[in-house]
Amino acid sequence: MSISIKAFLQTTLFFPLIFAAQTEAAEKVFRVGDNTVTSLEQLVPELKGVDAILVGELHDNKKHHAAQLAIIKALNKAGINFAIGIEMLPASAQTQIDAFLSGAMKPDVFQKIFEDYWKHEWSLYKDIFFFAKSAKLPVIGLNVSKSVSRKVGYQGVAALTPEETATVPPDIFCEVDGSGYMDFLRTSLMSHGQEERSFIYFCEAMVLWDKAMAWHTMDALKQNPGKQMVVFAGVGHAWKRGIPLQLRKNSDFVYRVILPELSRGIHRKTISPEIADYLIFE
């Protein structure tokens, strides 16, 4: 079985109003490798030996965040030592993240910091943050600063100052595997109504995000031997052609990818191991 690039492009990664958000966490898991179904509780032992677990989301879908919360609760219950990496905040916000988790920063202050960076509602993510706080789980910002991201997206990597360049991984250029991924990026650009932007600059920005999040994930793993990373990111970054590709090219860390099942594109009938290892579904 395989997923077509066209089908993937039609997911709600780009058309978020097609699917209604739901609040209940899905507990069924589809193993892509052998086409079998298991439960979240049965999945946990399979995740104990990996370094990074990437869990994809559609940012405005409550169901996906509920599933993410269920995953970290199950891992925590099993006694697994892990930290949570997030696309939603940059590495430069780590001091503020730590202050919130320690109780030194009031929730409403942290909410403003979150919303200033991330365009999606705090209400979608707050349960994950409050569980991490109560369970004393580290949360690590993986992204780049908004100013750097925007500059690359509209002016290219070459426009970065030496100071800005020092904050991002080296060798950022429009390097993608296969023409299908180029189609993926072009559709992403058009779906955001930004056809006037340079495709190369947009491509560099996407590679920047993937590589930066992989870079910070690898750094956290190196600094904390024995601790796993659970990374929450959009489907277009969590699938194996995003962050995992950069992990594979730049490290020997072992990872698994868990994506939400979608009505189109990412589905049990069409998914391939080249895209994900598991699908969460109801």
Image: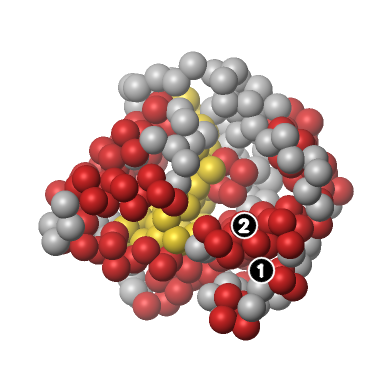
Residue drawn at x 39%, y 35% is: 121
Q: Nearer the viewer, residue 98 or 8?
A: 98
**Label 1 sits on what residue type?**
Lys
**Label 2 sits on what residue type?**
Arg
Rendered position, 202 above or below 272? below
Q: Is residue 189 visible?
A: yes
What is the C-alpha distance between the residues marked 1 and 2? Answer: 25 Å
Q: Is residue 198 left or right of residue 82?
A: right
Residue 228 locus on image (x, y percent): 37, 62
**Tag on residue 249?**
1
Q: Secondary structure at mark 1?
A: helix
Rendered position, 206 above or below 10? below
Residue 26 locus on image (x, y percent): 39, 26
Mark 1 neighbour class, 10 Å CA radius: few under 14, some 14 to 19, many 20 or more: few
Q: Earlier in the sequence, mark 1 or mark 2?
A: 2
Residue drawn at x 57%, y 20% is: 17
Query: Which label sits in the foreground, 1 or 2?
Result: 2
Provide the residue designation for mark 2.
150
Q: Secondary structure at mark 2?
A: helix
